[in-house]
Image (spheres, grey):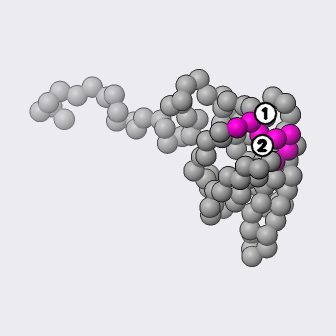
């Protein structure tokens, strides 16, 4: 999967179906539209997605979803600080923060 915006190309490598790729940091604002390219079933596919002004320099997370009908959707999530994450694996495990007394567990 590749995202192209103007002269910038972000390569996400292979993304398995129903999976989320590793994120890439943007170093410059996006163009008014971005091109998403991917290969599915041995066929190279491409879609151009127009972005509103509010997304061109968006400071949060942006995800592009490609569904089985080759429709590309854009999802966003704000970020309060650099370590924030909306991904479920950033949540603490159910045992973290549980009180315990040595010798009593």
In front: label 1 or label 2 = 1
- In terms of depth relative to the viewer, which is nearer, 81 or 18? 81
Residue 18 visible somewhere in the drawing: no
Name the image quarter holding the N terminus. Answer: bottom right
Pointers 1 and 2 in contact (C-beta within 8 Å): yes
Instruction: Identify the residue at image location x=86%, y=34%.
Output: 52
Bounds of the magenta span? 28-34
Label number found at residue 55: 1
Label number found at residue 74: 2
Residue 30 falls inside the magenta stretch? yes
Neighbour tally class for label 2: few under 14, some 14-19, many 20 plus, Cα within 10 Å:
few
Label number found at residue 22: none
Q: Percent x, y for residue 45?
A: 82, 65
Instruction: Identify the residue at image location x=70%, y=44%.
Output: 63
Q: Main secondary structure of the magenta part?
A: loop
Q: Residue furthest top?
A: 80
Residue 74 falls inside the magenta stretch? no
Label 2: which secondary element: strand
């Amino acid at each position: 999967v590749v995202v192209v915006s103007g002269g910038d190309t972000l390569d996400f490598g292979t993304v398995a179906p129903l999976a989320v790729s590793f994120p890439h940091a943007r170093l410059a604002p996006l163009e008014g539209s971005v091109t998403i390219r991917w290969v599915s079933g041995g066929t190279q596919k491409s879609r151009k997605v127009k972005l509103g002004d509010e997304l061109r320099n968006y400071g949060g997370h942006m995800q592009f979803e490609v569904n089985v009908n080759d429709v590309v959707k854009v999802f966003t999530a704000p970020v309060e600080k650099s370590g924030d994450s909306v991904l479920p694996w950033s949540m603490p495990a159910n045992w973290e923060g549980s009180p315990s007394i040595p010798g009593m567990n």
